[in-house]
Image (tube, rainbow, N blue to C red):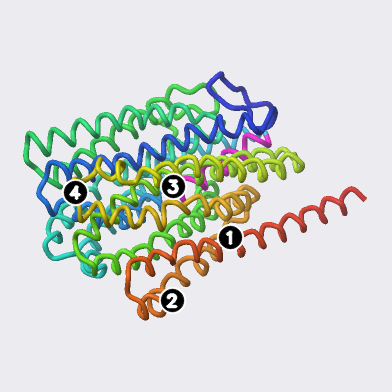
Amino acid sequence: MKIMRNKREVDLLHGSLWKNIPRLALPMAASSILQQLFNSADTAVAGQFAESTALAAVGANTEIVAIFVSLATGFALGINVLAAWAIGSGNRKQIRETVQTMPVLSLVIGLILMTAGLIIARPVLVMISTPAEAFDQALIYLRILCPGLPFLVLYDFGAAILRARGDSRRPLRALIESGILNVILNLFFVIVCHLDVAGVAIATDIANIYSAWLIIHWLRREDGDFRLQLRSLKLNRQVTRRILQIGTPAALQGVVFCISNVFIQAAINSFGSDAVAGSSVSLNFEYFGYYMLSEFAQASTTFISQNYAAGNNARCRSIFRVALVQALLLSAAICIPLTIFRAQAVWIYTSDPDVQAYACQRMLLVLLLTPMPSCYEVPAAVMRGYGHSLTPALEALFGTCAVRIIWLFTVFRASPTLPTLYLVYPVTWIITTILTCTSLFVILRRQNSAAESQAS
């Protein structure tokens, strides 16, 4: 049964992949970059207008907040794949059930994340050796940020529905509007109200509430099977189970990266507040390049899901090749210029020369190589589109988390310098690429053999 489309949507089943993948992926990348700009605005305002320790306080929470974001986007991937499968196969009943389940499931997961965040805030900040002079402000920032998590989850889940049908423009619009609101409120709460990190966190919460409201507003005005009807909301067990089967491994994969980075953050914290602040500045730029490549990977998941459900196996193989090339090139187009002009870029966040020196050091060693994860993110995304979500998660568990922890207790312990610490990133990227690409080729070979058997 054919699913009706509107002019905002990209046709994932037909047309040029070289044109259509960027049409879906670029607004998604812009959305993720804008979401990161929320944190960048926090960092910039804290560094320029708040107390001297405020920048370190926000920076100490970077990877902790990233864990919550990874959980939200990972579970949202389950919704995206399930909805895309339904669209590709023309299963209108499953579309309706997925749409009506989405808000309830997002509320449940969001409340769980909020509660967990409030409970673990202090122990985690202690565990990662947050500098004493920034600890209290870091704790305030994290505790205020946690009540906004349910709205972050609601936005991600609702955006996943729209993107599954090829509409990545409205999620981008939501983040543009909420991003502008976030910056304005940041400046108001910090400069006018003198709330320092508390004002920064409050501004982010309000921005998350606004973006979630916009997504729900649009879904309630959709036509046909995609229309969200509040009277029909329910937690469909079968849909929820399928979403969690796909989304949980993806969420855990993101968390694995973040947990490994928490260990690295603890090592960075041992070098003092200036090193923490400098690393935080560089990390903001790294996210820009990483989100560009990861959203091309996310787009490939959506493309693969629809085409696999529709039986377009040859197009699926082309999607992998095109998305990988585009992810590499466009992420490099961000990371290389930022690395070349790193001295000018870091000034946006801080005028402290010591912090600037630490930031430039990390940018040269890590930011320049950030396009490398394209080589495992795209293959992992393709596997998830085929329904293999657990395999890339397990490979990430070993290739990133385990290897990085081993590195900290062996190589870094033998040579406890920041360059030695930062070298762990490209090493683990290479290992994870080898594991992920090998698994994808095995899966594709099995599918080709099964298709040949059916043909004969």
Marks 1 and 4, the one that precedes in the sequence: 4
- Amino acid beneath label 4: Ile
Q: Which structural element holds mark 4?
A: helix
Marks 2 and 1, the one that precedes in the sequence: 2
Q: Please rate how many residues cluster around mark 1, counting C-alpha atoms within 10 Å: few if below 14, some from 14 to 19, many from 20.
A: many
Which circle marks residue 406 in the picture? 2
The question of residue 282 being in magenta is answered with no
Our reading of the magenta stretch's main secondary structure is: helix
Marks 3 and 4, the one that precedes in the sequence: 3
How much space separates mark 1 and mark 4, taking CA atoms?
37 Å
Residue found 71% across the figure and 41% down from its top: 318
Which circle marks residue 73 in the picture? 3
Which circle marks residue 102 in the picture? none
**Mark 1–mark 3 CB contact (< 8 Å):** no
Q: Which residues are magenta?
A: 73-89
Q: Image height check: is 372 above or below 35?
A: below
Q: Which structural element holds mark 2?
A: helix
Marks 4 and 2, the one that precedes in the sequence: 4
x%, y% of residue 91?
64, 35
The quarter of the image holding the N terminus is top right
Q: Image height check: is 435 above or below 156?
A: below
Which circle marks residue 433 in the picture? 1
Residue located farthest toward the top when viewing the structure as drawn: 7
Q: Nearer the viewer, mark 1 or mark 3?
A: 1
Q: Nearer the viewer, mark 1 or mark 4?
A: 1
Residue found 77% across the figure and 41% down from its top: 314
Residue bearing the label numbered 4: 144
